[in-house]
Amino acid sequence: MKPETTTGEGRTGAGIIDVHAHCFTSKDLAGDVARQLAGLRQRGITQVAVAGMVNDRLDAQQIWGLVPDWVENRGDGLFDEARDLLEHARLSKGAIVPLLDTRYLWGDIPGALGRYLRQGFRGIKGVYLPDPGNDLGVKGVPDTFGITVAEYRKREWEIFSFAEANDLPVLYHIDARRYGDTMAALLADFPRVRVNFPHFGIGRKAFSPFLDRYPNLYTDFSGLLSHMRENRESYRDFILQYQDRVCFGSDAILYKVEGSAHYLDALYDLGLPEEVLHKVCVENPLKLMGSALSGACV
C-alpha cells in the first residue's frame, strides 16, 4: 500500500522527522532546498536533522581524507559548512535541525562545541574513524591529525560528555562489527545520552545486543534503501522487534533532500502496522531529538 499524499501529515498522523541528513550545500542553493522541503511537507516529512562540518585548521588535501570520495560537494570547498547550514536552517523556519559534525574538531572541545551551540546548532554528529579500516573507506582521524588513538578517543569522550551535560542528541556513525568495544564503552560511560548509531549499527547481528541493553540508544535505516527493498521480510522483522528504537532516517544530502521520500516509500512498502509506523516516523525521533526540535529555527 502506497502512502497517501497529505499536507504536513503522513500516514502516521503527525509530522514525520528525518533524523539523518547531510549538508554539502551552499546557501546559494537555498531556493532549490526550499522547493524540495515543500515537497517533503506534502509527503508528511516536516523536519530534517542535517549535519554540517566545520573546519578551521585543515587544507584541502587533509580534509578530503575524512570524506568519502563519492560525496559530491556543492558547498564550501574546505567543508566549513556552519554559515551555510545555519542560513538554510534560518530560512527553513524550523524544518531544518542543524547538527554539528565534529570529525574535524581539535583543541578545546567543550569551548568549540559551546561556541557552535550558541551560534544555533541543536545537536551533535560524530563518526568513529580511528584507522583506515573503517567502513567508509576514509583515512583515520589520528593519521590525519598526527595524534594517537588514545588522544582521539579522549576527544570522542569529551564530545559525549558535552552532549550529556547539555542534553543534546548525538548522531554517531560507528561500526558495531569492528568497533563494538568502543560502542560498549561509550554507552557504559554515557548511558543518559540519547544517541543514534545509524545504519542499524552497520551490522544488525553485532548491534542487536546493544539495543537490548541500553534504553537511550536509537538507530535508523539510512543508507539501507536497496537492502530494505531486496530483503523486506528481514527488515520488517527487525523494525518490529526494535520498534521503540528505530527512527526514520535517509542520509540524504541537502541539495537533494527530496530523496528522503524514497525512504518513506520503502518503509511503507514493508507493510508495518500503523502504530509501528507512527513510532518510527514520529514518536522515536521525538524522544531522540528532544528539545533540539523546538529550538530548530535560528
Image (tube, helix red, strand yellow):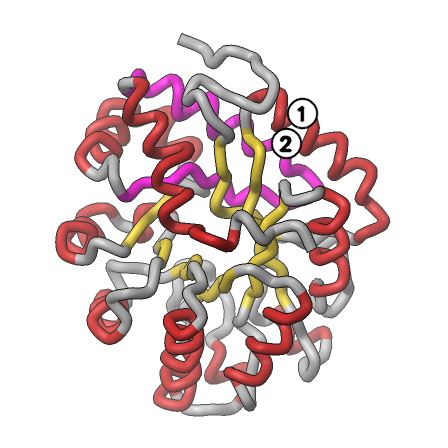
In percent of width and height, residue 107 lies at 55, 90
- The structure residue drawn at horizontal position 25% and vertical position 35%, both measured from the top left corner, is 243
Q: Which residue is mark 1?
A: 39
User: Residue flagged by tag 1: what amino acid is it?
Assistant: Gly
- The structure residue drawn at horizontal position 38% and vertical position 17%, both measured from the top left corner, is 269
Q: Which residue is mark 2?
A: 258
Left or right, 67 with respect to 187, comes to: right
Is residue 138 a member of the stretch shown in magenta? no
Q: Earlier in the sequence, mark 1 or mark 2?
A: 1
User: Residue flagged by tag 2: what amino acid is it?
Assistant: Glu
Placement of 267 over or under 56, stated as above or below: above
Magenta segment boundaries in residue numbering: 245-272
In percent of width and height, residue 183 lies at 26, 67
- Near-viewer residue (149 or 16): 16
In percent of width and height, residue 6 lies at 57, 15
Report if the CB atoms under discs 1 and 2 are less than 8 Å apart: yes
Q: CA distance from mark 1 to mark 2?
A: 7 Å
Quadrant of the drawing holding the C terminus: bottom right
Is residue 263 a member of the stretch shown in magenta? yes
Left or right, 130 with respect to 237, comes to: right
- Quadrant in the picture for residue 78: bottom right
- The structure residue drawn at horizontal position 53% and vertical position 72%, both measured from the top left corner, is 103
Provide the secondary structure element on which disc 2 rests: helix
Checking the image for residue 128, the label placed there is: none
